């Protein structure tokens, strides 16, 4: 897969009210150091000295994990290999979320399907407890045959969703026209594998085949480069190198914009910004820009 670069303007300092509670940090991919398996009763396993993590789902329970750190803006990369064969009814997730009723959230969800049919990649953004900003995609490869990298870039200007460093979605900060944007609540990284056969596959028409259980998804090469919530207090711009900090102002260059158009024209299967039936009173404000 080709790699696409991004234009980099000079790194801007975050507002002082945020900086007081942040310290720049990079996590370099050992699950023992970076992750807590939080549920699933031994269905989540860290293997190979912390280099591999697997989540399993059976008829009794799924499983999940979360990052030890909370981040207020970050770039998060994770390699995943999804549940193979008949994965109908299963949902594998990789997302950022804060807590509470007015929470913020940035979602990758991978909706399984019956053998021979493609996964659906579901993306969404919540700000102050409000989501309804779904875009869905198919992929241009088999996500069960090998590991692929899924990334979330979250900075004060925009959120970028990437697959193997190809952008599939950009959600811009549109607060200037009254659209909430996640910017003040620290978020953890979460992942889970769970049963959602009431809605996940073809609107719930295809159910989970429990004779195929346990279902397993695999994770490796977790990398978190971001601003960690801390009482120590340090500027988020105080990273180790220019590359470490590029995500803070990352945007698409011309090659990235071309790649985004290609992905969205070929592989997007749902876009809330074109769903006139869903929004009969008018599309959301950010869709009109």
Image: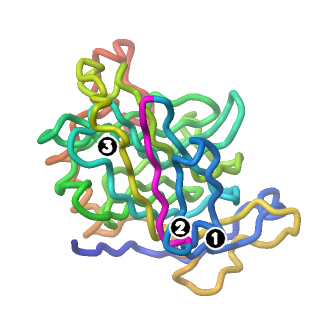
Residue 29 in percent (x, y) is at: 54, 72
Q: Earlier in the sequence, mark 2 or mark 1?
A: 1
Is residue 57 within the magenta segment? yes
Q: Is residue 62 above or below residue 241?
A: above
Residue closer to the observer: 261 or 200: 200
Callout 3 crowding tier (Cα within 10 Å): few <14, some 14–19, many ≥20: many
Residue at left 25%, top 49%?
84
The residue most toward the front is 211
Quadrant where the C terminus is found in the figure = top left
Residue 170 can be seen in this image = yes
Q: Earlier in the sequence, mark 3 or mark 2?
A: 3
Q: Is residue 247 left or right of residue 144?
A: right
Cβ atoms at labels 1 and 3 below 8 Å apart: no
Quadrant where the N terminus is found in the figure = bottom left
Question: Helix, strand, or loop for circle 3?
Answer: strand
The residue identified by callout 1 is: 12
Callout 2 crowding tier (Cα within 10 Å): few <14, some 14–19, many ≥20: some
Q: CA distance from mark 2 to mark 1?
A: 7 Å
Residue closer to the observer: 233 or 284: 233
Q: Earlier in the sequence, mark 1 or mark 3?
A: 1
Q: Is residue 151 left or right of residue 42?
A: left
Q: Is residue 206 above or below residue 91?
A: above
Question: Please, what is the dominant secondary structure of the magenta stretch?
Answer: strand
What's the image's color scheme? rainbow
Residue 266 in percent (x, y) is at: 14, 48
The residue identified by callout 2 is: 249
The residue identified by callout 3 is: 121
Cβ atoms at labels 3 and 2 below 8 Å apart: no
Cβ atoms at labels 2 and 1 below 8 Å apart: yes
Magenta span of residues: 50-59
Is residue 287 within the magenta segment? no
Q: Is residue 149 above or below residue 210?
A: below
């Amino acid at each position: 897969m080709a790699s696409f670069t991004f234009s980099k303007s000079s790194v801007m300092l975050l507002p002082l009210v945020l900086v007081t509670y942040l310290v720049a940090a990079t996590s370099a991919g050992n699950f023992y150091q970076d992750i807590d398996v939080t549920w699933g009763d031994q269905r989540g396993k860290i293997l190979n000295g912390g280099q591999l993590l697997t989540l399993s789902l059976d008829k009794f329970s799924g499983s999940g994990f979360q990052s030890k750190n909370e981040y207020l803006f970050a770039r998060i990369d994770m390699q995943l290999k999804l549940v193979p064969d008949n994965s109908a009814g299963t949902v594998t997730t990789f997302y950022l979320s804060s807590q509470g009723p007015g929470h913020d959230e940035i979602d990758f969800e991978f909706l399984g399907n019956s053998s021979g049919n493609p996964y659906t990649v579901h993306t969404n953004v919540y700000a102050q407890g409000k989501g309804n900003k779904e875009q869905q995609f198919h992929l241009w490869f088999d996500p069960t045959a090998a590991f692929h990298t899924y990334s979330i870039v979250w900075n004060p200007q925009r959120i970028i969703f990437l697959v193997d460093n190809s952008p599939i979605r950009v959600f811009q900060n549109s607060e200037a026209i009254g659209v909430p944007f996640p910017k003040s609540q620290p978020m953890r990284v979460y992942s889970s594998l769970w049963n959602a056969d009431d809605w996940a596959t073809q609107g719930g028409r295809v159910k989970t085949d429990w004779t195929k259980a346990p279902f397993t998804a695999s994770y490796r090469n977790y990398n978190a480069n971001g601003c960690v919530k801390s009482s120590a207090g340090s500027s988020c711009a105080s990273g180790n190198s220019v590359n470490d900090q590029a995500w803070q102002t990352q945007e698409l260059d011309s090659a990235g914009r071309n790649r985004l158009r290609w992905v969205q024209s070929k592989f997007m299967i749902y876009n809330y910004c074109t769903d006139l039936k869903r929004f009969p009173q008018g599309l959301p404000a950010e869709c009109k820009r």
